[in-house]
Amino acid sequence: MKKILVTGASGNIGKPLVQALRSQGADFELMRSKADQGSAARVASFADVASLRNAFGGIDTLFVLLPLVPNKLELAKNVAQAARDAGVKHIVRSSGAGADRQAAYALPRLQGEIDHVFQATGIATTFLRPAGFMQNYSGFMASMVKAGTVYAATADALQSLIDVRDIAAVAAKVLGNPQAHVGKAYTLTGGESLTDSQRVKILSETLGRPVNFVGVSLEAGNASMATMGMPASIVEWLGSLNALVSAGHAGAISPEVQELLGRQPITFRQFAQDSKGAWL
């Protein structure tokens, strides 16, 4: 099997992806931003083209997962240049649902710009475009679940959230046979569309105690993120995500997870059961 390099291996998608690649016996390495004792990972920084070029040497297929930072587009351009220079043959990128350079909302517009950067390299590409993550509830929203009230600026609108384990499973399948997915862009959602109120009801049933949902305005949501010290560009991007959800644009269900994996996506109830420890 051709050599694969996985970036973002320590994140929500990266961790289960590494497990999936190991289980299928893939020939892969990891890229990290700094050397870890006992780790065989290639060390490079998204901000340093020369280090990326060195890390990408001898790599056939590159899995790209960029951090959500203000200079995300610039980092993407660095990766694209280094991949082209190093002779990478295929780029598989974790993008976002609705990615489009002409999108009306800031975050999908950014994702579309980044996808275009990779398309413009002339290297074969595959884009994975997942919806919002179920794991947000067990991550940055875990303290709210524990406290019994989840606040969000999403108008209690429908969302087809996806479990990151399904994203990782799709990524592993694509990386295992990239030629079968050249030029494809897959929209990845869960198999059900639920409101915040419906999801916290499932959390309440799973935990055996009340968890409530309280909707806040888009303006209040943005102000809260700014108060937390988030950079203005991040507030704009995440605020645009709240806006598109509130406007009813995040409830569609894609069949592509089931088509690619041959099974139904993980349900929110299953996610809640598996993640119970995060809220105890």
Image (cartoon, rainbow, N blue to C red):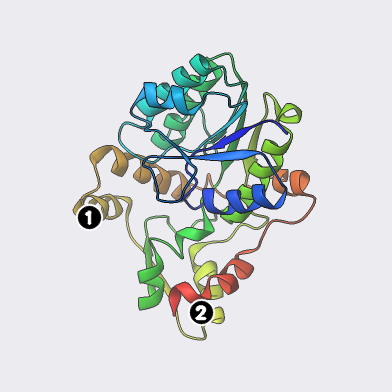
Instruction: Please tell me how crowded label 1 is: few (under 14), some (14-19), or many (20+) other residues with Cα within 10 Å.
Output: few
Q: Quadrant of the N terminus?
A: top right
Above or below, 220 relative to 184? below
Q: CA distance from mark 1 to mark 2?
A: 27 Å
In this rendering, which labeled residue sits more in front, label 1 or label 2? 1
Mark 2 is on which residue type?
A: Ser
Q: Is residue 162 visible?
A: no
Side of 230 where 141 appears, left or right: right
Side of 228 where 26 appears, left or right: right
Q: Position of residue 28 (x, y in %)?
A: 61, 39
Please tell me which residue lies in front, 33 or 230.
33
Q: Is residue 110 visible?
A: yes
Find residue 228 and name its label: 1
Say which element carries label 2: helix
Seen at 77% across and 55% down, the residue is: 263
Seen at 59% across and 17% down, the residue is: 123
- Which residue has dot 2 on it? 204
Above or below, 16 relative to 31? below
Q: Looking at this rendering, what residue extends furthest in the front direction?
A: 38
Q: Position of residue 139 (x, y in %)?
A: 42, 62
Instruction: Please tell me how crowded label 2 is: few (under 14), some (14-19), or many (20+) other residues with Cα within 10 Å.
Output: some
Q: Position of residue 142 (x, y in %)?
A: 40, 68
Q: Looking at this rendering, what residue extends furthest in the bottom direction?
A: 208
For marks 1 and 2 on the same chain, the one whose residue lies earlier in the sequence: 2
Seen at 70% across and 53% down, the residue is: 23
**Rendering quarter of residue 130:** top right
